[in-house]
Amino acid sequence: MMEQKSGQKKPPEDEILPIKVRNLSVTYRTEPALWNIDLDFPEGKMIAIVGPNGAGKSTLIKAVMGLVPITAGKISVYDKSYSKQRSKVAYVPQRGSVDWDFPTDALDVVEMGLYGKLGWLRRPNSQTREKARKCLEKVGLADYADRQIGQLSGGQQQRVFVARALAQDPQIYLMDEPLNGVDAITEETILSILENLRKEGKTIVMVHHDLQTVDKYFDWVVMLNRNLVAGGPIKEVFTRKNLDRAYQEKQRLSIR
Ligand code: ADP
Ligand code: MG
């Protein structure tokens, strides 16, 4: 096995993995948000993406789903392009990026997650409503199905989006800071759901802001700072040295 400079052991190139990122660069305007990233996301793991503000964490997740234009490189999802694998991936966006004034209730938000599976012309029906209801139940929000999403607490809104991802029944969960600003009960609820999903063999990729809990919750970590600082098992790569590299360099960059 070859050793990459990030410390990640490189699996054979023909191995099919949930997500492979090769030479990925993303530039929004003139400055690169991600530079030459190579990563292999293993199956059935809880994977944290960490790094300072502006490190490109959200950009990486969005790039996987084709939500931002890729300047260079390639991403595959189970060996194919994302567009062929949509149904295997669910996304929980960063909370600040969602328009909560949108007039829709919790059950609708969850059910909308199922539209992609139904195809354009199929309408939601009693079966999809039932499924959506069950998923709201799983996140402890059975009683809030009819509540406008704008009138839910931050933690409840986050749980609605987790329910929506669950309803899609994907292989891969891409979650952008789902634990940010939520109360302890919500954090516990979300983590125990994710733990069960991992036991079923699902792959969970989560942008995570709390460095204190990385080794407690996750198997794997990706440390970003526009460049890839490290990607691999927690024990191998979540080191003081890598943390310094991930967080200090950014500080230098942000002092203008
Ligand atoms: P993180 O999630 O790690 O905080 P982001 O991926 O959101 O970082 O952003 C990385 C960099 O790209 C930041 O400097 C941010 O300002 C910039 N950026 C993000 N999205 C856009 C966009 N849509 N247009 C222009 N610049 C963007
Ligand atoms: Mg972000």
Image (cartoon, rainbow, N blue to C red):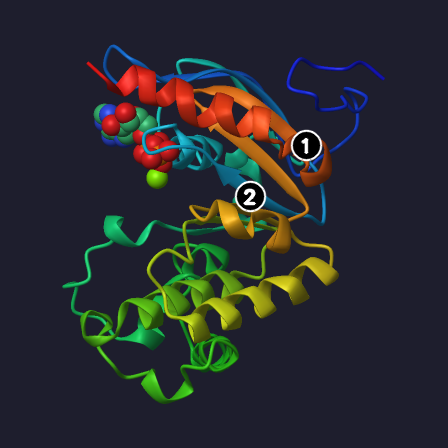
Could you tell me the amino acid type at mark 1?
Answer: Gly
**Residue that badge 2 annotates:** 48
Which residue does the image show at 16% across and 69% down from the upper left? 103
Left or right: residue 36 versus residue 29 is right
Q: Using the image, tell me which numbered label, if any, was put on residue 164.
A: none
Which quarter of the image is occupied by the N terminus?
top right
Place of residue 72 in the rendered image (x, y in percent of width and height, measured from the top left)? 45, 12
Q: Residue at x 52, y 78 (%)?
A: 138
Tell me what residue is drawn at x 77 percent, y 15 percent.
3
Residue 25: which quarter of the image? top left
**Which of disc 2 and disc 1 is earlier in sequence?**
2
* Quadrant where the C terminus is found in the figure: top left
Judge left or right: residue 45 versus residue 38. right
Residue 144 appearing in the image: yes
**Marks 1/2: CA–CA distance:** 10 Å
Name the quadrant where ligand 2 sits: top left
Q: Foreground: 121 or 27?
A: 27
Relative image position of residue 120 (x, y in whole percent): 39, 54
Amino acid at the residue labelled 2: Ala
Who is closer to the viewer here, 223 or 123? Answer: 223
Q: Residues within 10 Å of mark 1 (few under 14, many from 20)?
A: many
Q: Looking at the image, which is closer to me, 52 or 38?
A: 52
Q: Is mark 2 within 8 Å of ligand 1?
A: no
Residue 124 locus on image (x, y percent): 40, 71
Check the image and report above or below for 95 versus 43.
Answer: below
Q: Which mark is residue 232?
A: 1
User: On screen, 88 above or below 52?
Assistant: below
Quarter of the image holding residue 252? top left
